[in-house]
């Protein structure tokens, strides 16, 4: 498996990957998790997809998209503040130029088979590592996100603990939480599975 970053699709192949990502999101969020999201023609798309985000994708066998996340600068206004302010203790997020928001994270663990490392799916770890690596290379040191307590436990097991920004809140069927994750080389080295590869240009590492 490999990790790629796509912002503005420049080829037919990249456009196909983005299309497959939206189809994956529909299958996971609407189908498997039964979230209240809007799907059209089998694709899950929302208003934040119109803000020119960077997508981190995990590509498996046969070039299938098996994992994804959407990254947007936090200073441009976050999904957390606009859609899930109840997850913030003070209903306000202190953003800065080195903070990026991750949203629409998912991994099709059924498609990844039984490939695991330390009891976690390697695709999940590869996605975590990809988000961290891309963030560091683009000048971000913190990642803010809204997630659920199940993924919070997975992050803790992976050695990448979430710093909570408020107490858990029940949103429909999901026990949700907001928090901040560190983006540094120590976290990247801890998360990266042995099969990890990305299309990012990695400079010489400096002390974390």
Image (spheres, grey):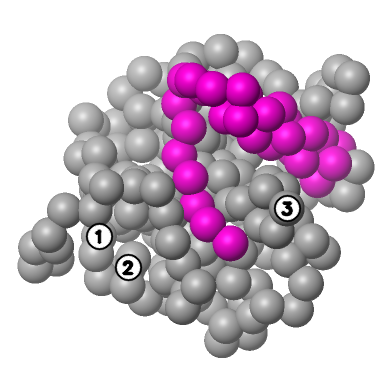
Are circles 2 and 1 on residues that touch, CB within 8 Å? Answer: yes
* Image location (x, y in percent) of residue 194: 46, 78
Question: What residue would you read off at disc 1?
Answer: 184
Whole-number angstrom distance, CA of label 2 to CA of label 3: 29 Å
Tell me if mark 1 has few (under 14), some (14-19) or many (20+) residues whose alpha carbon lies within 10 angstroms of its own: some
Q: Is residue 13 visible?
A: yes
Of marks 1 and 3, the one in the foreground:
3
Residue at the image position 68 percent from the left and 78 percent from the top? 115
Mark identifier at residue 62 = 3
Direction bottom: furthest residue: 118
Q: Secondary structure at mark 3?
A: helix
At x 56%, y 13%, the residue is: 50
> Can you tell which quarter of the image residue 73 is in?
top left
Residue 37 shown in magenta: no
Which residue is drawn at the image coordinates 50% and 73% (left, top)?
195
Q: Which residue is mark 2?
A: 187
User: Magenta segment range?
Assistant: 1-30
Q: Is residue 51 depicted above or below 172 in this figure? A: above
Residue 103 image point, x, y percent: 56, 38
Q: Is residue 12 magenta?
A: yes
Q: Earlier in the sequence, mark 1 or mark 3?
A: 3
Mark on residue 138? none
Comparing 26 with 100, the one in front is 26
């Amino acid at each position: 498996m490999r990790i790629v970053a796509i912002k503005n699709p420049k080829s037919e192949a990249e456009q196909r990957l983005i299309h497959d990502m939206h189809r994956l999101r529909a299958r996971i969020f609407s189908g498997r998790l039964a979230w209240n999201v809007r799907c059209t023609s089998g694709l899950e798309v929302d208003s934040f997809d119109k803000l020119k985000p960077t997508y981190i994708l995990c590509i498996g066998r046969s070039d299938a998209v098996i994992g994804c996340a959407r990254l947007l600068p936090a200073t441009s206004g976050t999904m957390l503040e606009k859609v899930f302010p109840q997850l913030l203790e003070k209903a306000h997020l202190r953003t800065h130029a080195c903070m990026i928001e991750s949203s629409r994270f998912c991994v099709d663990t059924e498609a990844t088979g039984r490939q695991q490392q330390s009891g976690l799916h390697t695709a999940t770890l590869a996605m975590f590592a990809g988000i961290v690596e891309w963030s560091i290379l683009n000048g971000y040191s913190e990642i803010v996100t809204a997630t659920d307590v199940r993924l919070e436990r997975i992050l803790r097991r992976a050695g990448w603990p979430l710093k909570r920004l408020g107490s858990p809140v029940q949103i429909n069927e999901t026990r949700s939480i907001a928090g901040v994750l560190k983006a540094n080389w120590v976290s990247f080295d801890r998360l990266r599975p042995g099969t990890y590869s990305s299309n990012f240009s990695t400079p010489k590492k400096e002390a974390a």
